[in-house]
Image (spheres, grey):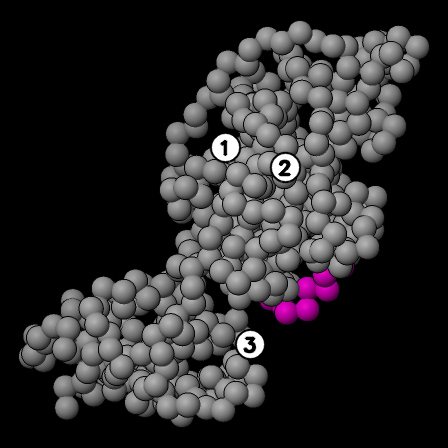
Amino acid sequence: MFAEDILRQFTAEATGFINDPSRLDQLLADAEEQLRKIPHVGETLAGLPIVISMVKSWVKREYEVQPKVLATIVAAFLYLVKGKDLIPDKIPIVGMTDDIAVLGLALKFVEPELNAYRAWRDGTAPATEAGEEPAKAAKAPITIKAVKLYENGFMTQPFAMGGEGAEGLDPSVRYRSSLQNYVIDTGSEVILVDTGMPDGMPNQVPDEKTAIYMGTRIQDYLDALKAVGYTPENVSKILVTHKHADHTGLLAAFPMATIYASPEEAQAQELALPNVTAVAYKDGPYYNFPASEKIADGVYYLPAKGHTTGNSIVIVEDGGLFYMLHGDVTYTDEALYANRLSVVFEDVAAARATLDQVREFISAHPTVYLSTHTPLGVENLENKAVIDLNNPPESIPPTEVAAAEATGRYICSVCGYVYDPAEHDGIAFDALPDDWKCPRCKQGKDKFGAA
Ligand SMILES: [Zn+2]
Ligand SMILES: [Zn+2]
């Protein structure tokens, strides 16, 4: 029997993939891609999506699969993905029919295991015949949209890359900046990652000393959310990356949603709301990240400490890609490529460990990096651009900032506090002592920009 020979042919090579999660992961993604190209997969192969899901559960160590079963599945996928080049000439291959025969045989082998997996996945649902798995079992695609708040800003190189020291960095080199958060629509629920700046913040007026200028406001958060199709009533969950005002500004507008935050951030004044839940990260390691919590199918919340001690990131798995939604792991992608920390507020050592983990993950998995403070976040999302750390794209310079009339007011880039000389006996911001601190968040003068 030809199909059997073919499977045997690939079983030895399968071991190499089983021992290397990142290779296995890539193989699964490639197999999914390949399966999309087989027209009329039909009833024989309708169980394949659940096979892929079972192997993914095994990779994440949430489900045990017998080595023999795993080897058979991986061998079948190996054949599917690269078989045409590797089969010796003496075995006649005549195209799609053989794909179906080989995969069908593999499915038959693993059928009892598949039924057990299905029952485990569905709770206690009774097992059904493998061949009866309806095509709709394939997961609906997840949609991610950018909620755009500010555009055409800039940040200086020391701000973008000076988290571990600014030596050699040039304040006259600037990178583009913006502000946007993200919405994840799983098809069954709407999940926000952060909720923008508080409404009505005065516009910043940049000068030559400004380290970060977020740009001009496009619109307030709720209007920006509406522009991508959602109102607060649609939102069931909010994942907070960290406590800073530009990530938590409108939390109070979502009293019906569950707000997820790390235990540290859940204590912060910005998150003092009854619907905040401290996440225990109870679901164990996620690839090379030590801890995680599954928020929804394909949506994971992971600790990423440093920028703040309770910083977290979100990873969304969809269509063979990993979307990494983060607060301020880096302020701009240029820092990610250069392996430099952006400005860190609370724990530089933890921020370094986090950036190492993030870069390790990105090296091993096709990742779309979705940042908050650079338009690259929006562009990466629109293009589904997978980060290749060894091939940074050319950095686009920021647009010239139009000079605006300064008001004498200064605004804290961390907490949004506005210093107005009129409320301080007419003392100009520049005249304040160098060790003056923000009365709200205790950051220094350098974190303030003219408004
Ligand atoms: Zn921040
Ligand atoms: Zn931020």
Query: Would residue 57 be counted in the magenta stretch?
Result: no
| First reached walking from the N terminus: tag 1 or tag 2 | 2
Q: Which residue was labeled with disc 3?
A: 62
- Compare residues 160 and 273 and report the one nearer the observer: 273
- Name the mark nearer the viewer: 2 or 3: 2
Image x and y of residue 168, in percent: 58, 23
At 56% from the left and 88% from the top, the residue drawn is: 124
Q: Which residue was labeled with disc 2?
A: 221
- Name the mark nearer the viewer: 1 or 3: 1
Range of magenta residues: 278-286
Please identify the quarter of the rendering in which residue 405 is found. Answer: top right
> Secondary structure beneath disc 3?
loop
Residue 330 numbered mark, or none: none
At 76% from the left and 59% from the top, the residue drawn is: 278
| First reached walking from the N terminus: tag 2 or tag 3 | 3
Image x and y of residue 215, in percent: 58, 23
Residue 375 numbered mark, or none: 1
- Compare residues 80 and 147 and report the one nearer the observer: 147
Numbered label tally? 3
Please tell me whether the stretch drawn in magenta is mainly helix, strand or loop.
loop
> Secondary structure beneath disc 1?
helix
In the rendered view of the protein, which quadrant contains the C terminus? top right
**Looking at the picture, which amino acid does disc 3 mark?**
Glu
**Looking at the picture, which amino acid does disc 1 mark?**
Pro
**Looking at the picture, which amino acid does disc 2 mark?**
Tyr
Query: Label 3 neighbourhood size at 10 Å, few (<14), some (14-19), many (20+)?
Result: few
- Name the mark nearer the viewer: 1 or 2: 2
Query: Label 1 neighbourhood size at 10 Å, few (<14), some (14-19), many (20+)?
Result: many
Tell me if 397 is positioned left or right of 447 in this view.
left
On screen, 407 above or below 257?
above
